[in-house]
Image: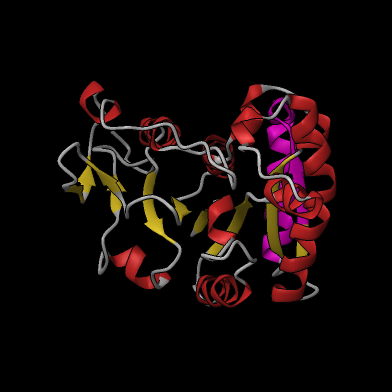
């Protein structure tokens, strides 16, 4: 089994705005302990770069060149944290949207490393790509899952309410089809720490379901097994037809 776990930028920061190493390390250990082969898509380079420069401007308000500038320094800090938490088996992939034109080569390399027990940490290559697609990693995580023929994608956040909720704040525990009604419940997710809102997650979930892949939106503060099994509030987007169905 292959799973792709996207860790949102906001996941990395506690209420005081400091890197929450204890929480992230605990979740990483839980995920690595799973029998599944895991590819992490990790946001946070721009936020860490801004923090190092004392910048408080919302990421969504930055110019593409400002994002590239902060990502260029922040990615170093991000990987330093992950190397310290996960050890020498970490392998970094920085991927731009146009790199998926050679997706077979990328994923064969990932599969080779996964088979050797490596821990893959991916991020969008923001310093080398200035398009609007760099604003969020929800869709790149799903595209990676499609190329890898993964079984499930997890989108973990922190600042938003747990799972996907309606306009009356009621939780959608399971979603089989995304409609305009779901999008009407979304707000802009731009903040000082990141840009991913619920609309980007719905876009990603829609693509995943069209390809027969499950997707779960959960909160990084909850134990990973509880997110997986539904023991805590979260939302499972699951297609009627699985990718392995023959009909």
Q: How is the image coloured?
A: secondary structure
Residue name at image x 32 percent, y 42 percent: 242
Left or right: residue 57 compared with residue 160: right
| Image location of residue 80, percent across then percent down | 80, 65
| Viewer-closest of 169 and 114 | 169
Instruction: Please tell me in which quadrant of the rendered image residue 21 appears.
Output: bottom right
Rendered-image quadrant of the C terminus: top left
| Image location of residue 74, percent across then percent down | 78, 51
Residue 58 highlighted magenta (yes or no): no
The reply to whether residue 240 is in sight is: yes
Residue 98 highlighted magenta (yes or no): yes
State the count of labels. 0
Instruction: Please tell me in which quadrant of the rendered image residue 192 appears.
Output: top right
| Image location of residue 164, percent across then percent down | 29, 45
The reply to whether residue 7 is in sight is: no
Residue name at image x 81 percent, y 49 percent: 53
Q: Main secondary structure of the magenta part?
A: helix
Q: Please, is residue 226 above or below residue 244 in the view?
A: below
Instruction: Please tell me in which quadrant of the rendered image residue 183 appears.
Output: top left
Residue extent of the magenta highlight = 92-115
Residue name at image x 25 percent, y 21 percent: 180
Left or right: residue 239 compared with residue 20: left
Q: Please, is residue 192 above or below residue 128 in the view?
A: below
| Image location of residue 216, percent across then percent down | 37, 51
Q: Please, is residue 28 above or below residue 66 in the view?
A: below
Left or right: residue 68 compared with residue 7: right
């Amino acid at each position: 089994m292959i799973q792709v776990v996207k860790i949102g930028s906001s996941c990395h920061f506690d209420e005081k705005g400091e890197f929450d190493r204890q929480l992230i390390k605990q979740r990483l250990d839980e995920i690595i302990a799973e029998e599944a082969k895991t590819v992490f898509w990790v946001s946070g380079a721009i936020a860490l770069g801004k923090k190092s420069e004392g910048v408080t401007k919302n990421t969504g308000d930055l110019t593409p060149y400002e994002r590239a500038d902060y990502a260029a320094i922040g990615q170093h800090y991000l990987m330093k944290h992950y190397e310290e938490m996960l050890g020498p088996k970490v392998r970094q992939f920085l991927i731009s949207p146009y790199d998926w034109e050679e997706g077979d080569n990328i994923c064969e390399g990932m599969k080779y490393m996964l088979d050797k027990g490596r821990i893959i940490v991916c991020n969008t290559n923001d310093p080398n790509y200035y398009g609007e697609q760099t604003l969020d990693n929800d869709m790149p995580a799903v595209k990676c899952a499609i190329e890898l023929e993964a079984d499930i994608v997890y989108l973990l956040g922190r600042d938003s309410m747990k799972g996907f909720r309606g306009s009356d704040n009621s939780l959608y525990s399971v979603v089989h089809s995304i409609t305009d009604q779901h999008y009407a419940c979304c707000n802009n997710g731009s903040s000082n720490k990141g840009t991913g809102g619920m609309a980007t997650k719905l876009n990603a979930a829609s693509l995943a379901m069209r390809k027969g892949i499950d997707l779960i939106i959960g909160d990084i503060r909850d134990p990973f097994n509880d997110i997986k099994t539904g023991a805590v509030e979260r939302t499972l987007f699951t297609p009627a037809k699985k990718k392995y169905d023959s009909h």
